[in-house]
Image (tube, helix red, strand yellow):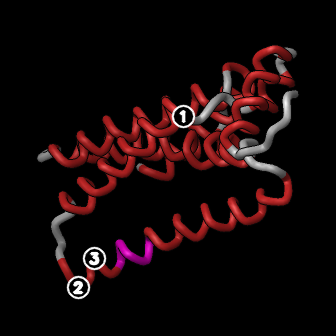
Amino acid sequence: MFFIGWALSSLFVARLGDLIGRKKVFVAALLLQVVTILILINSTNLHLSMAGLFLMGVSTAGRMSVGFFFLIEQVPKDSQGKLSTSMAAFDATAMIWATIYFSYFSHNSVYWESFALLLTIVSLTFIAIFVPESPKFLYEKRMFREAREVLNYIADKNGVGIEV
C-alpha cells in the first residue's frame, strides 16, 4: 500500500509544488506524515494500518520529490552535491537502523514510530518557522520582490553582507 500511495501521488505532487509553492507542499507532506504516524501507532485494525501505509506513501512523494528540490534550492550550487548526498545517506542510514532495531532489539514498532513522529514534528516546526519559500520558485512565478526578500534573508543567515 505504501508504494501504491507513493506512485499515485507522484503523478501530481511534484507539479503541485510547481504551482502553489514547494514549501507549502513540503509542509503539507510533513503534516500528513504526522497524522499518518499517529494512525499507525494507534491502529489495531489491518484495514486502518493499510490506509495509514497508503497515506505514508502519499506523504513520501511530497517529502522525497518536492522536499528534495525545496531544500536543494536553498543552498549555493557548490553545496548542492554535498546536501543531496547527505540527504540520501540519512535516508539509507534510517533503513539500516530500522533493520538493526527490528532484528536485534524489538519487534514492536511503536518505539520506532514514536521516534519518527518526534523527528517529523521537529523538522516540520523548523521548516515552517525558519526556512523560507524557494527563491527559485518565487522568481519563476515572477514574484521578484518576495524572491529578493528571501535571497536577502538567506544571505543574512549565511553571514554574507550583500543586498540583492
Q: Amino acid at mark 2?
A: Tyr
User: What residue sits right under mark 1 in the picture?
Assistant: 130
User: Alpha-carbon neighbours of circle 3 within 10 Å: few (<14), some, or many (≥20)?
Assistant: some
Amino acid at circle 3: Tyr
Q: Earlier along the polypeptide chain: callout 2 or callout 1?
A: 2
What segment is highlighted magenta in the picture? Answer: 95-99
Instruction: Answer left or right for 156 relative to 128.
Output: right
Could you say which is closer to the camera, residue 119 or residue 49? 119
Q: Amino acid at mark 1?
A: Phe
Q: Residue at x 38, y 75 (%)?
A: 97
Percent position (x, y) of residue 81?
A: 77, 63
What residue does disc 3 label?
A: 101
Q: Quadrant of residue 147?
A: top right
Residue at left offset 70%, top offset 46%: 158
| Residue 141 position in % (x across, y down) | 83, 18
Disc 2 to disc 1, C-alpha distance:
38 Å
- Asked if labels 1 and 3 touch by Cβ distance under 8 angstroms, the answer is no
Residue carrying label 2: 104
Residue 21 is left or right of residue 100, and the answer is right
Q: Quadrant of the C terminus?
A: top right
